[in-house]
C-alpha cells in the first residue's frame, strides 16, 4: 500500500460543491466519495484504490481506478492540497470505463463487522469475498 502524493478538494464541472480528490504523479483522481464518508486512498500495483466507509448508511465501497486512465472531467483544484499548485485540471472520475467497484451494505455489512476493519483488512475481505477482479458487484443480502 503506497500513499498518494497529495489530497484535497476539487470543483468538477457539473458538481454542486467541491469533492474529495487525490493526486498520483501528474494526475488528479476523484474517487467518488460522498461527503459523509471516511476515505482512505492508496496506490496498489497499477491502481489507485479508494476505501469509502459510510457508517451512517452501513455501507463500505472499494473502488479501483487504473492509474493509466485518461482524465476526462474538467475542474479546478479547490482547497486542501499541500503539495500541488492551484490550477485548472482534468481528472479521472469513478464513472469512467475501467473503474472497478465493490459495495457491501445492509445485513452482510453488519454480520461481518465491516465498519471495524482497517482499510487493508477491508481490501483483503473484499478480495476473498469476490476475487481479485471485483467489477461492479454489490452484496446486499442476496446475489445479484
Image: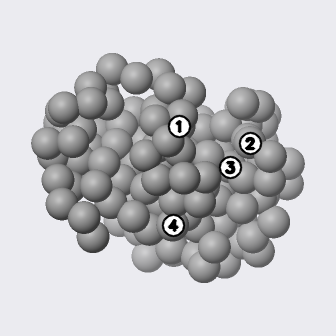
Residue that label 4 marks: 135
Left or right? Give the position of 44 relative to 110. right
Question: Image height check: is 111 above or below 14?
Answer: above
Q: Quadrant of the N terminus?
A: top right
- Residue 63 spot, x, y in % from top left: 52, 54
Disc 3 and disc 2 in contact, CB within 8 angstroms:
no
Query: First in sequence: mark 4 or mark 2?
Result: 2
Instruction: Say which residue appears at 65% left-offset and 66% top-offset.
Output: 92
- Residue 40 spot, x, y in % from top left: 53, 34
Residue that label 1 marks: 123
Query: First in sequence: mark 1 or mark 2?
Result: 2
Q: How crowded is mark 4: few (under 14 residues within 10 Å), some or many (20 or more)?
A: some
In three-dimensional space, the C-alpha distance between marks 1 and 3, rounded to whole angstroms, equals 13 Å
The secondary structure type at the circle numbered 1 is helix
The secondary structure type at the circle numbered 4 is loop
- The foreground one among 100 and 53 is 100
- The foreground one among 11 and 39 is 39
Nearest to viewer (mark 4 / mark 2): 4
Report which quarter residue 15 is drawn in: bottom left
Using the image, tell me which numbered label, if any, was put on residue 44: 2
Specify the color scheme.
one colour
Q: Residues within 10 Å of mark 2 (few under 14, many from 20)?
A: some
In three-dimensional space, the C-alpha distance between marks 1 and 2, rounded to whole angstroms, equals 11 Å
In three-dimensional space, the C-alpha distance between marks 4 and 2, rounded to whole angstroms, equals 17 Å
Using the image, tell me which numbered label, if any, was put on residue 48: 3
Nearest to viewer (mark 3 / mark 2): 2
Disc 4 and disc 2 in contact, CB within 8 angstroms:
no
Instruction: Say which residue appears at 80% left-offset and 53% top-offset.
Output: 46
Disc 1 and disc 4 in contact, CB within 8 angstroms:
no
- Whether residue 126 is visible: yes
Left or right? Give the position of 106 relative to 23. left
- Whether residue 119 is visible: no
Amino acid at each position: 500500500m503506497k500513499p498518494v502524493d497529495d489530497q484535497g478538494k476539487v470543483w468538477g464541472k457539473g458538481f454542486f460543491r467541491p469533492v474529495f480528490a487525490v493526486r498520483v504523479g501528474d494526475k488528479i483522481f476523484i474517487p467518488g466519495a460522498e461527503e459523509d464518508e471516511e476515505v482512505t486512498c492508496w496506490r496498489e500495483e497499477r491502481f489507485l484504490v479508494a476505501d469509502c466507509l459510510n457508517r451512517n448508511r452501513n455501507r463500505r465501497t472499494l473502488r479501483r481506478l487504473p492509474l493509466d486512465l485518461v482524465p476526462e472531467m474538467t475542474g479546478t483544484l479547490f482547497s486542501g492540497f499541500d503539495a500541488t499548485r492551484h490550477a485548472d485540471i482534468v481528472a479521472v472520475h469513478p464513472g469512467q470505463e475501467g473503474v472497478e467497484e465493490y459495495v457491501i451494505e445492509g445485513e452482510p455489512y453488519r454480520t461481518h463487522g465491516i465498519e471495524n476493519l482497517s482499510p487493508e483488512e477491508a481490501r483483503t475481505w473484499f478480495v476473498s469475498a469476490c476475487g481479485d477482479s471485483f467489477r461492479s458487484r454489490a452484496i446486499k443480502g442476496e446475489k445479484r
